[in-house]
Protein backbone atom coordinates (compact mmCIF):
# COMPACT_ATOMS: atom_id res chain seq x y z
CA UNK A 1 0.00 0.00 0.00
CA UNK A 2 1.35 3.44 -0.88
CA UNK A 3 2.32 5.81 1.89
CA UNK A 4 -0.09 8.68 2.34
CA UNK A 5 2.13 10.79 4.56
CA UNK A 6 3.08 13.23 1.74
CA UNK A 7 2.16 16.86 2.24
CA UNK A 8 1.86 19.85 -0.05
CA UNK A 9 4.13 22.82 0.60
CA UNK A 10 1.48 24.80 2.49
CA UNK A 11 0.39 21.91 4.67
CA UNK A 12 3.34 21.94 7.09
CA UNK A 13 3.13 24.48 9.92
CA UNK A 14 5.42 25.27 12.81
CA UNK A 15 4.48 23.92 16.21
CA UNK A 16 3.19 26.53 18.67
CA UNK A 17 5.53 26.99 21.63
CA UNK A 18 3.08 26.63 24.46
CA UNK A 19 2.22 24.48 27.42
CA UNK A 20 0.05 21.49 26.35
CA UNK A 21 -2.55 22.27 28.99
CA UNK A 22 -2.53 26.07 28.86
CA UNK A 23 -5.92 27.62 28.23
CA UNK A 24 -4.43 31.13 28.29
CA UNK A 25 -2.18 30.31 25.35
CA UNK A 26 -5.16 29.32 23.24
CA UNK A 27 -6.92 32.51 24.26
CA UNK A 28 -3.87 34.47 23.15
CA UNK A 29 -4.37 33.27 19.59
CA UNK A 30 -7.88 34.67 19.39
CA UNK A 31 -8.06 37.63 17.06
CA UNK A 32 -5.25 36.33 14.88
CA UNK A 33 -6.11 36.84 11.23
CA UNK A 34 -5.71 33.79 9.08
CA UNK A 35 -4.65 34.04 5.48
CA UNK A 36 -6.64 31.44 3.61
CA UNK A 37 -4.56 29.29 1.28
CA UNK A 38 -6.66 28.53 -1.81
CA UNK A 39 -6.90 24.90 -2.83
CA UNK A 40 -5.72 24.71 -6.42
CA UNK A 41 -7.91 23.01 -9.00
CA UNK A 42 -7.49 22.63 -12.72
CA UNK A 43 -10.45 24.10 -14.56
CA UNK A 44 -12.04 21.90 -17.21
CA UNK A 45 -13.68 23.19 -20.39
CA UNK A 46 -17.38 23.78 -19.85
CA UNK A 47 -18.12 21.85 -23.02
CA UNK A 48 -16.98 18.60 -21.44
CA UNK A 49 -19.72 16.31 -20.23
CA UNK A 50 -18.88 13.40 -17.97
CA UNK A 51 -20.10 11.56 -14.92
CA UNK A 52 -19.58 13.19 -11.52
CA UNK A 53 -17.40 10.24 -10.51
CA UNK A 54 -15.14 10.74 -13.53
CA UNK A 55 -14.99 14.48 -12.84
CA UNK A 56 -14.05 13.78 -9.21
CA UNK A 57 -11.15 11.56 -10.29
CA UNK A 58 -9.82 14.25 -12.63
CA UNK A 59 -9.77 17.05 -10.06
CA UNK A 60 -8.53 15.11 -7.04
CA UNK A 61 -4.84 14.82 -6.27
CA UNK A 62 -3.24 11.36 -5.96
CA UNK A 63 -2.98 11.91 -2.21
CA UNK A 64 -6.71 12.64 -1.88
CA UNK A 65 -7.58 9.57 -3.93
CA UNK A 66 -5.35 7.38 -1.76
CA UNK A 67 -7.02 8.74 1.39
CA UNK A 68 -10.49 8.05 -0.05
CA UNK A 69 -9.48 4.53 -1.07
CA UNK A 70 -8.08 3.87 2.41
CA UNK A 71 -11.28 5.10 4.07
CA UNK A 72 -13.39 3.02 1.69
CA UNK A 73 -11.42 -0.08 2.70
CA UNK A 74 -12.46 0.73 6.26
CA UNK A 75 -16.17 0.82 5.37
CA UNK A 76 -16.45 4.60 5.19
CA UNK A 77 -19.97 5.92 4.61
CA UNK A 78 -20.13 9.54 3.46
CA UNK A 79 -22.71 11.69 5.21
CA UNK A 80 -22.90 15.35 4.22
CA UNK A 81 -20.17 15.98 1.67
CA UNK A 82 -16.95 17.90 2.20
CA UNK A 83 -16.86 21.10 4.22
CA UNK A 84 -16.87 24.55 2.64
CA UNK A 85 -14.05 27.00 3.20
CA UNK A 86 -16.37 29.22 5.26
CA UNK A 87 -17.29 26.30 7.56
CA UNK A 88 -13.61 25.50 8.16
CA UNK A 89 -12.78 29.16 8.75
CA UNK A 90 -15.65 29.46 11.22
CA UNK A 91 -14.25 26.54 13.22
CA UNK A 92 -10.82 28.19 13.16
CA UNK A 93 -12.32 31.44 14.43
CA UNK A 94 -13.81 29.55 17.39
CA UNK A 95 -10.61 27.73 18.37
CA UNK A 96 -8.41 30.76 17.73
CA UNK A 97 -5.76 29.01 15.60
CA UNK A 98 -5.45 27.68 12.08
CA UNK A 99 -6.04 23.95 11.78
CA UNK A 100 -3.08 21.69 10.94
CA UNK A 101 -2.64 21.71 7.17
CA UNK A 102 -3.39 18.09 6.32
CA UNK A 103 -6.50 17.98 8.52
CA UNK A 104 -7.71 21.24 6.98
CA UNK A 105 -7.26 19.78 3.49
CA UNK A 106 -9.05 16.62 4.63
CA UNK A 107 -12.11 18.59 5.73
CA UNK A 108 -12.22 20.57 2.48
CA UNK A 109 -11.87 17.59 0.17
CA UNK A 110 -13.07 14.39 1.85
CA UNK A 111 -16.05 14.20 4.17
CA UNK A 112 -17.45 13.31 7.54
CA UNK A 113 -19.26 10.04 8.06
CA UNK A 114 -19.31 6.57 9.58
CA UNK A 115 -16.54 3.98 9.58
CA UNK A 116 -16.82 0.24 9.98
CA UNK A 117 -15.19 0.25 13.42
CA UNK A 118 -11.80 1.13 11.97
CA UNK A 119 -8.84 0.44 14.25
CA UNK A 120 -5.36 1.87 14.64
CA UNK A 121 -2.47 0.82 16.83
CA UNK A 122 -1.15 3.41 19.26
CA UNK A 123 2.58 4.03 19.57
CA UNK A 124 2.58 3.34 23.31
CA UNK A 125 0.98 0.86 25.73
CA UNK A 126 -2.74 1.46 26.33
CA UNK A 127 -5.35 0.22 28.82
CA UNK A 128 -7.73 -0.73 26.00
CA UNK A 129 -5.68 -2.27 23.18
CA UNK A 130 -6.16 -0.72 19.74
CA UNK A 131 -7.81 2.62 19.13
CA UNK A 132 -11.27 2.39 17.55
CA UNK A 133 -12.88 5.01 15.32
CA UNK A 134 -16.51 4.57 14.35
CA UNK A 135 -17.27 8.10 13.17
CA UNK A 136 -15.40 10.97 11.51
CA UNK A 137 -16.77 14.29 12.76
CA UNK A 138 -17.92 17.22 10.66
CA UNK A 139 -16.94 20.77 11.66
CA UNK A 140 -20.38 21.10 13.30
CA UNK A 141 -19.67 18.01 15.42
CA UNK A 142 -16.27 19.39 16.40
CA UNK A 143 -17.82 22.72 17.39
CA UNK A 144 -20.41 20.97 19.58
CA UNK A 145 -17.60 19.49 21.69
CA UNK A 146 -15.41 22.58 22.07
CA UNK A 147 -16.75 23.18 25.58
CA UNK A 148 -16.08 19.61 26.69
CA UNK A 149 -14.71 19.36 30.21
CA UNK A 150 -12.88 16.13 29.33
CA UNK A 151 -10.39 17.47 26.78
CA UNK A 152 -7.64 20.06 27.15
CA UNK A 153 -8.02 23.42 25.44
CA UNK A 154 -5.14 22.64 23.09
CA UNK A 155 -7.03 19.84 21.33
CA UNK A 156 -10.24 19.17 19.45
CA UNK A 157 -12.28 15.96 19.15
CA UNK A 158 -12.46 14.86 15.51
CA UNK A 159 -13.92 11.37 15.82
CA UNK A 160 -15.84 8.98 18.04
CA UNK A 161 -14.98 5.40 18.97
CA UNK A 162 -16.68 2.73 21.07
CA UNK A 163 -15.87 2.07 24.73
CA UNK A 164 -14.69 5.56 25.54
CA UNK A 165 -12.11 5.99 22.78
CA UNK A 166 -12.25 9.47 21.24
CA UNK A 167 -9.93 10.67 18.47
CA UNK A 168 -8.31 14.00 19.38
CA UNK A 169 -6.20 16.36 17.30
CA UNK A 170 -3.76 18.71 19.03
CA UNK A 171 -4.00 22.25 17.68
CA UNK A 172 -1.33 23.93 19.82
CA UNK A 173 1.71 23.03 21.86
CA UNK A 174 4.70 20.78 21.22
CA UNK A 175 2.52 18.02 19.71
CA UNK A 176 0.72 20.33 17.25
CA UNK A 177 -0.93 18.25 14.51
CA UNK A 178 -0.49 14.93 16.34
CA UNK A 179 -3.44 12.59 16.96
CA UNK A 180 -4.21 10.89 20.25
CA UNK A 181 -6.72 8.41 21.57
CA UNK A 182 -8.49 9.92 24.56
CA UNK A 183 -9.72 7.34 27.06
CA UNK A 184 -12.83 9.05 28.41
CA UNK A 185 -13.38 6.11 30.78
CA UNK A 186 -10.06 6.99 32.49
CA UNK A 187 -9.05 3.36 32.92
CA UNK A 188 -5.56 4.39 34.00
CA UNK A 189 -7.06 5.58 37.29
CA UNK A 190 -10.30 3.66 37.65
CA UNK A 191 -9.19 0.12 36.90
CA UNK A 192 -7.82 -0.94 40.24
CA UNK A 193 -6.44 -4.37 41.09
CA UNK A 194 -9.92 -5.40 42.22
CA UNK A 195 -11.44 -4.36 38.89
CA UNK A 196 -8.78 -6.25 36.96
CA UNK A 197 -9.52 -9.42 38.93
CA UNK A 198 -13.13 -9.22 37.75
CA UNK A 199 -11.99 -9.08 34.09
CA UNK A 200 -10.26 -12.43 33.47
CA UNK A 201 -10.47 -12.25 29.67
CA UNK A 202 -8.54 -9.01 29.11
CA UNK A 203 -6.02 -9.03 26.27
CA UNK A 204 -2.46 -9.66 27.34
CA UNK A 205 -1.38 -6.24 26.04
CA UNK A 206 -3.93 -4.59 28.32
CA UNK A 207 -2.75 -6.57 31.33
CA UNK A 208 0.79 -5.53 30.48
CA UNK A 209 -0.24 -1.87 30.59
CA UNK A 210 -1.52 -2.24 34.14
CA UNK A 211 1.53 -4.23 35.18
CA UNK A 212 3.67 -1.32 33.96
CA UNK A 213 1.38 1.14 35.74
CA UNK A 214 1.60 -0.66 39.06
CA UNK A 215 5.39 -0.94 38.72
CA UNK A 216 5.63 2.76 37.79
CA UNK A 217 7.31 1.75 34.49
CA UNK A 218 4.98 3.38 31.95
CA UNK A 219 6.66 5.72 29.43
CA UNK A 220 6.91 9.27 30.71
CA UNK A 221 4.23 11.66 29.49
CA UNK A 222 3.38 15.34 30.08
CA UNK A 223 1.32 16.15 33.14
CA UNK A 224 -2.35 15.42 32.50
CA UNK A 225 -1.67 13.11 29.54
CA UNK A 226 -2.27 9.94 31.58
CA UNK A 227 -5.44 9.19 29.58
CA UNK A 228 -4.05 10.29 26.20
CA UNK A 229 -2.34 7.75 23.96
CA UNK A 230 -0.39 8.77 20.89
CA UNK A 231 -1.52 7.34 17.54
CA UNK A 232 0.14 9.36 14.76
CA UNK A 233 2.11 12.52 14.02
CA UNK A 234 -0.35 13.78 11.39
CA UNK A 235 -3.85 13.24 10.03
CA UNK A 236 -2.50 11.62 6.87
CA UNK A 237 -0.42 9.18 8.89
CA UNK A 238 -3.45 8.41 11.06
CA UNK A 239 -5.63 7.55 8.05
CA UNK A 240 -2.85 5.35 6.71
CA UNK A 241 -2.83 3.34 9.95
CA UNK A 242 -6.56 2.59 9.95
CA UNK A 243 -7.68 -0.97 9.31
CA UNK A 244 -10.70 -3.17 9.90
CA UNK A 245 -10.34 -6.55 11.58
CA UNK A 246 -11.58 -9.48 9.57
CA UNK A 247 -14.43 -11.23 11.31
CA UNK A 248 -14.19 -14.98 11.81
Image: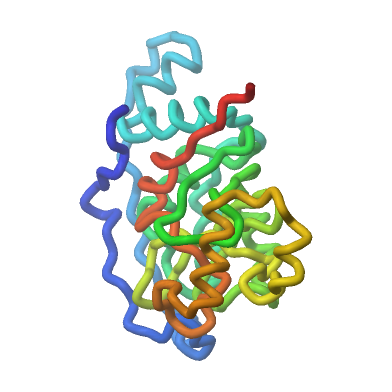
Quadrant of the image occupied by residue 244: top right
x and y percentages locating residue 50 in the rendered image: 45, 9
Tell whether 39 sits left or right of 24: left
Instruction: Residue at 50% x, 90% y: name it.
Output: 24
The front one of 146 and 38 is 146
Quadrant assignment for the C terminus: top right
Quadrant of the image occupied by residue 41: top left
x and y percentages locating residue 91 in the rendered image: 56, 63
The front one of 228 and 172 is 228
Instruction: Residue at 37% x, 54% y: name it.
Output: 234
Residue at the far left in the pictured view: 9
**Count of all numbered marks drawn on residues in the image:** 0
Instruction: Residue at 28% x, 30% y: name it.
Output: 2
Q: Is residue 214 above or below residue 44?
A: below
Residue at the far right in the pictured view: 198
x and y percentages locating residue 221 in the rendered image: 42, 77
Q: Is residue 144 above or below residue 22?
A: above
The front one of 23 and 196 is 196
The front one of 50 and 236 is 236
Quadrant assignment for the N terminus: top left
Instruction: Residue at 72% x, 53% y: name it.
Output: 200
**Residue 114 visible here:** yes
**Residue 94 visible here:** no
Quadrant of the image occupied by residue 145: bottom right
Amino acid sequence: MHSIEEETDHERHESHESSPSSFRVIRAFRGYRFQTVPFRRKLLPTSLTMSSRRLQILIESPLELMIREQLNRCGFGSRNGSETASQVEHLESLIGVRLPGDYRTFLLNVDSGDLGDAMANCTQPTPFGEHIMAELFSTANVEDLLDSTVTFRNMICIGYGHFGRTTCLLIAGADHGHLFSLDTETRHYKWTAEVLKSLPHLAESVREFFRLRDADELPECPWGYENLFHIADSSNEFVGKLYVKQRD
